[in-house]
Image (spheres, rainbow, N blue to C red):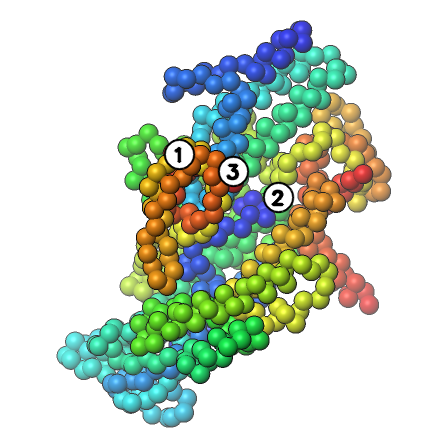
Amino acid sequence: MAANFTLDSNPDSYFSLDDILASQEKVPCTFNTQVSNMGYMDQSTTDTNIVSGTKLELPFWLAKSLDRGSRSIINIDTPKNYKEVYRQIFTADPNVVDLHKLGPYFYLFGGKLISLHLPDNDDIASVLLKTFQGRFRRIMDGSQNTLNVDLTSQVSLLDEQERLLFSAGQQGLHDFQKWETRESEKLSTSTMVANHRKRKRFVLSSKSS
Amino acid sequence: MLAEKALDLIRELKRTSGGTLPPFNEDKIRQVLEEVQTLFEQNRDTAKYAAEGQHDVLAAIQLRHAGIQRNKRCLLAYLYNRLENIRRMRWEFGSVLPADVKYNMCEHEVQWFNQYNRLLANYMRSIGESGGLDLTQDMKPPKSLYVLVRCLMDHGEFETQDGTVILLKKNSQHYLMRSECEHLIRQGVLEHIVQ
Amino acid sequence: MSTEDVGDDLLETVDDEEEEEAMTAPEVLHKLEEAWLNEKFSPDLLPVKSNLVECMLDQIVAMENNISTLKKGDFRISVHRMEIDRIRYVISSYLRHRLAKIESLTTHVLQEEEKRRDSENVLMSPAELEFAKGYCNSVMTHLTNTALDHMPLKAATPNAKEIAVLPNLDSYVFLKVNENTENVLVEEETVDAREEIMDFEKGDQHIMRYKPIASLVESGGVSLI
């Protein structure tokens, strides 16, 4: 619909691309039963079956769907990045951590982990909150106080959701600037039309050269 | 691993930035549908062993079932997000899409676009009692009645509200009523000059 | 036509058929502007203010008729035209925000409308409802034709509840209090969860989660800003 309207529908909607990507993050699992004919999922062996005791990293969506409490065919362990060692690193100085490398859906995936009721659930929840609290001020400062400065190095360390927040801040700053210089009054070509034309020009010029 | 190809579709959409619609990936969709079919048949063929109490078969069925659901989610999300993109294009480009954009749409998507066009037109016509309201106009709060514009391309003759006919020639400048030239500005024919 | 006539028509008293009280055009416009901002900032679709929209659209027609009686070059023409443009912008923007929500939250708004069917306070205008149904249909048909029809029947049945896109009622909004309201329950969703009760005083401004104050937005007790 109406251009430049961004609706914040539920982040875990069925159709959300980010939610689908976040639920692809891996969780360490141990099979406590044999699974017939699914051996191809374990690339370290040529067995036809998955044998009981096999350790495999499964995507979250699969682990979650197999998670049926005590009747589960798998046991789920906390992923490395959310374990005690990493939790200490995050709490010590959250600002230096490269959450994009460790994520890139550090918070979204973290929130999903909570739904698995792992033994260290409370600690995971609290490290998510503390990490964000520790990093929030820098994200806000960075996105609010700099115009036309190269921020790539700061942004590269941010997780996907932090990036959204960062660009929302930047957008606000830009809009304010435009308002101050009366540029927001200017009726402009719609972005899609402008981009489309740019691409076309690019195609044309690369053809002629 | 299960449902890897379906995830490729999602990654493909995530990579493309606003305003672009990647080519409809018919090939990948067919592969995803084939995987669903295979998983489904395997489950159907082994169901009786599971019913007889073979736990290893039951476990396999659980895995494959999850795989089917995941494939379905990725596939529907791919299609749904493309529709959202196409819908946005109706507001940006207008009711006629550029040929190269249309080229990347599948047959059903073109049909959907036409249907959306109709729904929107019907809705806008039914607003109020005097012929409707064009919601694709008045996108910004009005600041003045007239605006100074420059033609970015030759557009031919244009009849203003009071019946005067003017020639929109490249680089010519005109003083027009905002409400009658907003569309041409959004389509990139005219450029609004703020003094 | 004299100056007074035009002025009078601008401020013409409008009878609201359903409510007994009569409102002047500027009052209606003010109400519409409030509804517009509420719609703009609320994550969920609010009950439509058809009366206000129709009333202002009639007002535009009346003003245009007045203009046509004025001589060309009369300075009042541009003043009225400007006013018409402003009103039309508010109406359009209001309806656009609503349409955007109807499109993104289609199944959700149709379900909510179903729940309200017997109440006076409907969510959508008849035209919006028709659009919502048509839109919902077109999307489901597309998903069915391109994907679901090519899957085994048992795998293909979509779970309507699962695929419905819901509004994010946990998002935060800025609000201004219009009427004193006591004992508003505001849940605090922090690690050490606790309930909190607040008193709203007229003129107060707050930032908080949408969900606990949703009913106050609908009743007019608070306005989103």
What residue is drawn where x is 44% and y is 16%? Answer: C22
The local crowd at label 3, few if under 14, some if 14 to 19, many if 20 or more residues have their Cα within 10 Å, is some
Look at mark 2 in the image and give the residue it sits on. B94
Can you give x and y, in whole percent of width and height, for residue B2 in the image? 39, 76
Look at mark 3 in the image and give the residue it sits on. C37
C104 sits left or right of B95 in the view: left
Give the chain of mark 3.
C
Q: Amino acid at mark 2?
A: Gly
Can see residue A31?
yes
Give the image quarter of residue A83. Answer: bottom left
Contact between marks 3 and 2 (CB within 8 A): the answer is no
Can you give x and y, in whole percent of width and height, for residue A89 in the image? 49, 79
Say which element carries label 2: loop
Q: Nearer the viewer, mark 2 or mark 1?
A: 1
What residue is drawn where x is 60% and y is 33%? Answer: C89
In this view, the residue in front, C66 or C128, is C66
Q: Which mark is residue C180?
A: 1
The local crowd at label 1, few if under 14, some if 14 to 19, many if 20 or more residues have their Cα within 10 Å, is few
Q: Are the residues flagged by discs 3 and 2 from a single subunit?
A: no
Q: Is residue C196 above or below residue B163?
A: below
Can see residue C141?
no
Say which element carries label 3: helix
The quadrant of the picture occupied by the N terminus of chain B is bottom left
Q: Are the residues flagged by discs 1 and 3 from a single subunit?
A: yes
Q: Are the residues flagged by discs 2 and 1 from a single subunit?
A: no
Give the chain of mark 2.
B
Can you give x and y, in whole percent of width and height, for residue C103 in the image? 46, 46
